[in-house]
Amino acid sequence: YRALVLLVISCPCALVISVPLGYFGGIGAASRKGILVKGGNVLDALRDIKTVAFDKTGTLTRGVFEVSRILPREGVEEKEVLHAAALAESRSNHPIARSILQAAGMQYILEKVETHEVSGKGVAARHKSGDILAGSAAFLKEHGIAVPEPDAPGTVVYVARNGAYLGLILVSDILRPESAQAVRDLHDMGIAKVAMLTGDRRSGAAWVAEALKVDEVRAELLPEDKVAALESFGPKEQTMFVGDGINDAPVLAGAGVGVAMGGLGAQAAVEIADAVILDDSPARAADLIRIGARTRAIVWQNIVMSIGIKAVVMILGIVGLAGLWEAVFADVGVALLAVLNAARTARG
């Protein structure tokens, strides 16, 4: 009889049912917040996060650009600079390219032009008017073209044709209203460092970093530079990266937890990320960490409760103070309690 009591008590139903149910509930709670989580292992990984790094364009900012100024070199007209840039960017889906085409009237997408986009740098194009380069200062310098450094905030697109510098286009972006709150929430949760990694020039990134009070900003980064910068923040398991662009795919893969913006984000970023934010709100990064911590706490509550009650009833059964009714409670009763507790994770 005592052996039968111990056999009933030792059935691991509570652990087998409640632990995965806790993770399913956590994934469900995240989905209610507009976050798709690709597995319970992602919720587990969130407990180790010490550094959260954001991309700038399209993540902390809206990614809705407008051409604010055109600064041609002496002897060149503004419309000539804009025309050349529009031709070069006519086959690109980048938000900056769209803003240049919008300013130029979009008609240049019908022009016959061959383009070659260099990730994180710029675009080289071949048109009947000549060979055109549009991109960062480093991109033009690689082709032996000297460019000036403008004293104005915003993203800069430098333009050259046939090896001669034509001018630059200043493109401005708008901060997301929830970005500052996202940074504050992460700091309040005890995240040691909130950083910003961007391919934009330093002056364009500095005003965003200052407005949001991020701990560290690194600018003018190529995709591989972002990976190296994230690795410098500490062990991979302690880092989270939030980004939206195709240039962010390598660093999303290299982070402990990679989070992609699903609304305007590139398909490559969405596919490789561990979680996807559907409404593109950076504030969801803090929600995700909060849900991960709550889910893990409830899972551990179930583990301790299940093993603890079973151990007590088992000791009573060994000395003859617990019968089959107590054994049934230690099995089925504890399993039901664990299931009810695990269901709390689904409420977020």
Image (cartoon, rainbow, N blue to C red):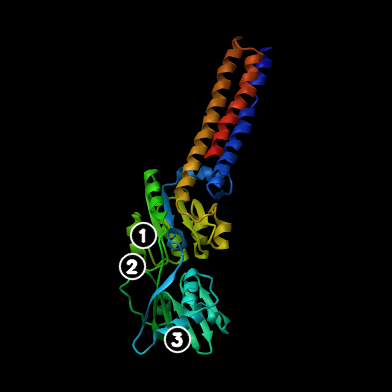
The residue furthest left is 151
Q: Amino acid at mark 3?
A: Arg
What whole-number distance in Å separates the C-alpha atoms at marks 1 and 3?
Answer: 33 Å
Q: Amino acid at mark 1?
A: Val
Quadrant location of the N terminus in the rendered image: top right
- In the visual, does 205 lie left or right of 268? left
Q: In the rendered view, tell whether residue 178 sits above or below residue 43.
A: below
The residue drawn where x is 53% and y is 27% is 304
Disc 1 vs disc 2: which is toward the camera? 2
Q: Which numbered circle lies on residue 203?
A: 2
Q: In the rendered view, tell whether residue 27 sits above or below residue 81.
A: above
Pointer 1 or 2: first along the chain: 2
The residue drawn where x is 58% and y is 82% is 110
Q: Which residue is mark 3?
A: 161
Q: In the rendered view, tell whether residue 59 sits above or below residue 297.
A: below
Q: Amino acid at mark 2?
A: Ser
Pointer 3 or 2: first along the chain: 3
Q: In the rendered view, tell whether residue 9 sits above or below residue 80.
A: above
Q: Which numbered circle lies on residue 217?
A: 1
Label 1 close to label 3 by CB (< 8 Å): no
Circle 1: element type: strand
Q: Position of residue 241 (x, y in %)?
A: 46, 55
What whole-number distance in Å separates the C-alpha atoms at marks 3 and 2?
Answer: 26 Å
- In the visual, does 193 lie left or right of 281? left
Label 3 crowd (10 A; few <14 / some 14-19 / many >=20): many
The residue drawn where x is 41% and y is 55% is 179
Q: Position of residue 112 (x, y in %)?
A: 58, 85
Pointer 1 or 3: first along the chain: 3
Q: Position of residue 224 (x, y in %)?
A: 47, 64
